[in-house]
Image (cartoon, rainbow, N blue to C red):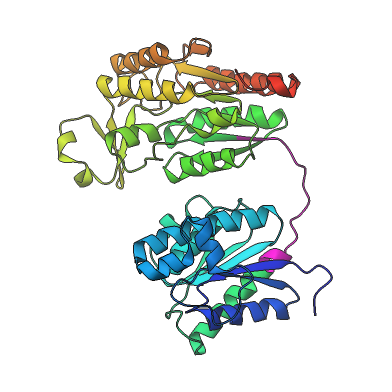
Amino acid sequence: MIAPESKTIAVIAALDTKGAEARFVADIVRERGHRALMIDIGVLADPQRRADISSAEIAHEGGVELHQLRRSADKAQAMATMTTGAAVVAGRLYRARKFDGIIGLGGGAGTVIGSSAMRALPVGVPKVLVSTLAAGNMRPYVGTKDITTMYSVVDIAGLNGISTRVLANAAGAIVGMIETRIPTREIRPLVVASMFGNTTACVDRARGILEAAGYEVLVFHATGQGGQTMESLISDGHVDGVLDVTTTEWADELCGGVLSAGPNRLDAAALAGVPQVVAPGCLDMVNFGPPETVPTQFAARKLYCWNPSVTLMRTNPDENVALGRILAEKINQSKGPVTVLLPLGGVSQLDSIDGEFWWPDADKALFGSIREHLRSDIPVLAIEANINDHTFADRAARSLLEMIHAKASLPSHQHAHP
């Protein structure tokens, strides 16, 4: 019996080895009045039951035909092919409104492939992943998306007293997600901001100004994953403005710290043409764990124990020259309005007069390198204040609002820089 407001849930699994378990989940979905779209990612043999989306289609979209994968028996190639193909197919199906939520189940291979499909979907799409790996570190599989993971407890290898309970709970979870009505609320234009403990005062002040102007502000902690998630939201087209005043993750990427966001940090807003304010916030510090985890080559450097689990290392002038060049090169990609703000009174709470990381020569090296490598048409505002002073925060917020409003007033064909 299909409910009046029935929806479709994609069930992704290797139907050659997990067919019975996938059918068990699909049956519960149907019993609850919804449709199940079966996606097969199995490579070893034909599925135990015909799928709506075949593994041959997944393999084709991954760049290799299924019969070739079976003939070669190269497990690494099969994994790479199906992982790529699953993401392509899931993204295309969702854009075509073929499903409303997705549930996956599997062991190691099923987790890799299923999570790849889920990461190809926007934030907000219901996603449940039943995995034998879910009791461990799921960061590589979840990435920056809102994937709900459930530990399978036993291997997904047959229906038994434990697996049926776990799978039934998972099916109930995904059904509950798609049936949940999101409360209506005022939709406001969205601004994202990067923040660290050492720039909290700045972002809190600027956020208040932006919210008073009618914007919703999402703040991301610049801990690597936070920066990646912010970049992902920008790339997905959800964001109207970016207050990127805490670019510290690049210091970790350069120096081998533990909070790197990877080499693509600062790409999304520039390439999408989203108005952005960029500042070198907290580029005075690299993050490590407890003191004993700091690499030996940095033993003689200026270190500060932020808490028992976090040791900060002060960046030096040479590193700041490199960081300034990197920031400038990233910002130079900008297709939309951008303004760079330089806090001449220090780039963090610690980098203030009499602060632990106060080092004017290092900051001058950073600011000079940014100016040297930055595109000549990009505005640079030097503010005689610490990054956490009201003067700086107010200027950052106003600059962003001015760019957002100016872009909105332009004809659509003039929104991007040539």
Q: Quadrant of residue 232?
A: top right
Q: Residue furthest bottom?
A: 161
Residue at 42 percent across and 79 percent down: it is 155
- List x then y, in percent, for residue 57: 56, 63
Relative to residue 182, is residue 253 drawn left or right? left
Residue 59's place in the image compared with 132, above or below, is above
Residue 40's place in the image compared with 418, above or below, is below
Q: Nearer the viewer, residue 408 or 1?
A: 1
Residue 306's place in the image compared with 112, above or below, is above
Q: Nearer the viewer, residue 311 or 115?
A: 115
Residue at 66 percent across and 81 percent down: it is 27
Asked if residue 388 can be seen in this view, the reply is no
Q: Write the start and end of the magenta stretch as one range.
A: 176-191
Figure quadrant of the C terminus: top right
Residue at 39 percent across and 40 percent down: it is 262
Is 85 magenta? The answer is no
Residue 31's place in the image compared with 237, above or below, is below
